[in-house]
Structures are given as C-alpha cells and as structure tokens.
Amino acid sequence: VTPAESELIARVLASDDRAAFGELVCLHQSAVRQFLRTLTRGDAAWADDLAQDTFVQAHRKLRQFRGDAAFSTWLLGIAYNHWRNARRRQREHTPLDDTAPDDAARTATQQVDLRHDLAFALRALSADEQLAIHLGYQQGKSHSEIAALLDWPLGTVKTHLARGKEKLRQRLAAWNPQT
Amino acid sequence: MESTDLTPSPSDERRLELLLRQANPMIPDHGFAQRVLNALPPKRQHLRQGVVRAGLCIAGAAIGAAVAWQQGVDLRDVPEAIERFAASSTSLQDAWSVPAAFATHGHWVLVSLGVTAVSLLFAFQPRSWRRWT
C-alpha cells in the first residue's frame, strides 16, 4: 500500500470522505476495469457494471482491509468474487467463448501491427491462461499474489502462465508475415 | 516499426514479456468515478449519532441526579448505599431494603445510577459490541 493510498484510506475510514474515496477509484479504476474486461472476454458494459459493484463493496468493506496485500490486489479479489457470483447467476446472459477467432478476423488482424496481433492472440487463449497472463504481466502481480487472489495452487498459476506464453509465442510466430 | 520476429529464445522471451506488460492501455475514467460515488449509500452519520446519543444519556443522568437532589437525597450517602447493596447476597428484595440511610428516595438514586451506567455503556460501546445492539 503506497503512502498516498494509506492517507486516502484513512480519510475514508475517519470521516467517510467521499472525495478521498473518489481519488482511490480514479487510481484503480483502470486496473479493475481491465481485469473485469479480461474476465468477461471483452464485454465492456458488463465489466463496468461489475467494476461499479466492486468499488461500492470495497467502500462498504474498507475497514476489513488489513494492508497484508497491495490495495489493488484486494480490489481485484473483490472484483473476481463479483464476477464469479454474477456469472453463476447470469450464465445464460454472457456465455464464455473459449473458441479461437475466426478466419475473417485472423485475416484482418494480419494487416495490423504486433500489438494488435498480441491482443488477438490473447483472446485465443483459454480463460484461465488469459487471466493468469493478464494478472502476471499486465497487472504486474506475483505468482503467489495470483494464487491467493484466484484461489489457485501456485503450480497451477505457473502452468497457466507457461502454457499461455507458449501459445502466444507460437501464434505470434505463425502470424508473422515475414516468416 | 517493431520487428515481429518472435522465435523462441531467451531474448525473445523477454521481448514477449515486455510486450505483454506494455499491452495494458489505461482506460480513461470518463465519469466512472462519479458513477461509483453516485452509487454509494448515503453518507454515514455514526459520529454525529454517537455524540447525540451520548449527549442524551448524560443529560438524562444529570436531570435524574438533579431531581434526586431536589427530593432531599443526600448524595454523600451514595457510596455507603452502593457498598451495602453490593454486600447483600440474600435476595433482591433484601438488597432493595438495605440502604436505610437513604430514607425514602435512596433506592431511586441506585436505580438511576444503574440506568446511567448502562446508558453510558450503550453510548460509548466498543465497536466490536455494535452488532449485538
């Protein structure tokens, strides 16, 4: 927890300072929304609804935050639980799509740069691999933090990361127009 | 222009990891924080409620003591009455009749002290007790 975060949290706890909580939301909204967009496979509207619920619950439970983990990790844990509960309730609303992208999309993607290819390759990973890669590289979480956050064994985290990276490497190599 | 050569090698492994770390564009707020703030429940009034509750309890205790004093109870007898009350191990009825030094109104002082103690405890209760009250 950074000193700035600590101060903001203290202000919220002391007097329910809404401006301070707003600053906390501004600091972490991007990470939480990115994470939820990964979980919802790009459903931005659903992800933002879940992100809003995440921050509302974080406000309610802020006193329970002990500072054992980073504040962002604590928020992502709440977000993950929200997503799991929402998916359980609305399974038919947003079915997970683990299939690989179609050929038309592949052709279009070949025309753009490596970053787009990477985004495309990420979407082709399994949900768990995508989640592990997102948390490990895009959110900068350690293996043990990911394991605690997702309630996975450490070995599972490492396996998903390794498999995900291997698939990415293969896909990006295959799509390279110069090879 | 970025090279797209990603054959497996230690340096390419690092390039892929770097690329993954960079592939996390910031999502602009665009009113999201305000949306969250609007969704929060109304601001809590714990502190103000606590002060009001404590004030009411203290005012009640003061009024009770004033009434007792006005009725002619000598408050210097309170410690003796409490000792007798505490020493009484027979029955509540015996305990009730023990503080003879209080004449007619003495037991009301004990009752008001008890009520005051409970009220103050309620007003300033530790946070861990809150779920029980």
Image (tube, grey):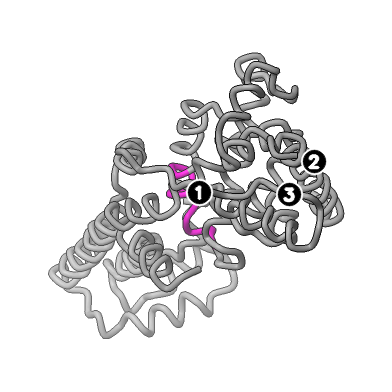
The stretch of residues the image draws in magenta is: A55-65
Judging from the image, mark 1 belongs to the subunit labelled A
Mark nearer the viewer, 2 or 1: 2
Position of residue B69 in the picture relative to residue B7 (left or right) = left
Q: CA distance from mark 3 to mark 2?
A: 8 Å
Could you say where residue A3 lies in the image, as x and y percent from the top left? 42, 73
Report crowding for label 3: few under 14, some 14 to 19, many 20 or more residues within 10 A (C-alpha): many
Which residue bears the numbered disc 1?
A31
Judging from the image, mark 3 belongs to the subunit labelled B
Q: Secondary structure at mark 1?
A: helix
Judging from the image, mark 2 belongs to the subunit labelled A
Q: Residue at x 33, y 64 (%)?
A: A11
Identified by mark 1, the residue type is: Ala
Q: Residue at x 62, y 19 (%)?
A: A94
Quarter occupied by residue A169: top right
Q: CA distance from mark 3 to mark 1?
A: 28 Å
Which residue bears the numbered disc 2?
A170
Position of residue B123 in the picture relative to residue A73 (left or right) = left
Identified by mark 3, the residue type is: Leu
Q: Residue at x 39, y 75 (%)?
A: B99
Identified by mark 2, the residue type is: Gln
Could you say where residue B9 lies in the image, as x and y percent from the top left? 81, 58
Q: CA distance from mark 2 to mark 1?
A: 27 Å
Which residue bears the numbered disc 3?
B6
